[in-house]
Amino acid sequence: MKKLAGFTLVELLVTLAIIGIVAGIVIPMLTGQRDSARRKSTEAIAHSVAAELDSAAKMRSGSTAPSVIAYVRALPNFTYPACKNAYASGVSPIVLGTAANDGEVGLLATTQNDTSGQTVAVVTVSYKVSNSPVPLTLTSVPVE
């Protein structure tokens, strides 16, 4: 008589159980990755813009805060499509004013008092991400 080769029912059930356990562990870990990546992308753009604003403010002494903002917004790495909003495809993340929508990095020319009490021009950088009900202020960059 010929011996038939194949898998037994027990072997198939064990394999399905192992796949179920692995899926039960991996799927919950992956569900929040998209939102986490979007938040990190927005934060990275905000940090990059703040660093560039600081550099531009130092290089362009005598400039006004709005002119520093205009200079940075015109740089190729901060214009669409090189710089994209992670939450809204086809949209630049860098906006004038305070960030209002998820993925936006807002640039606002304001004034504040320095340590000596003098009023100085600054550029306030804010960004909005999905887990934050209000925009987060990253930094205020003094403009001389």
Image (cartoon, rainbow, N blue to C red):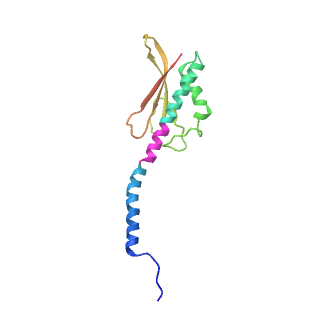
Q: Is 40 inside the magenta-drawn segment?
A: yes
Is residue 137 something that shows in the picture?
yes
Residue most toward the right?
76
Residue extending farthest bottom? 1
Q: Is residue 71 magenta?
A: no
Residue at x 38%, y 75% (from the top left corner): 9
* Residue displayed at 54% across by 38% down: 92
- Which residue is depicted at the point 60% across and 30% down? 74
Q: Position of residue 128 (x, y in %)?
A: 44, 35
> What percent of the width, then of the height, locates residue 31?
41, 51
Up-down: is 31 above or below 97? below
Q: Nearer the viewer, residue 96 or 51?
A: 51
Provide the major secondary structure of the magenta segment.
helix
Classify the position of the C terminus by image quarter: top right
Q: Which residues are magenta?
A: 32-42
Q: Residue at x 50, y 42 (%)?
A: 86
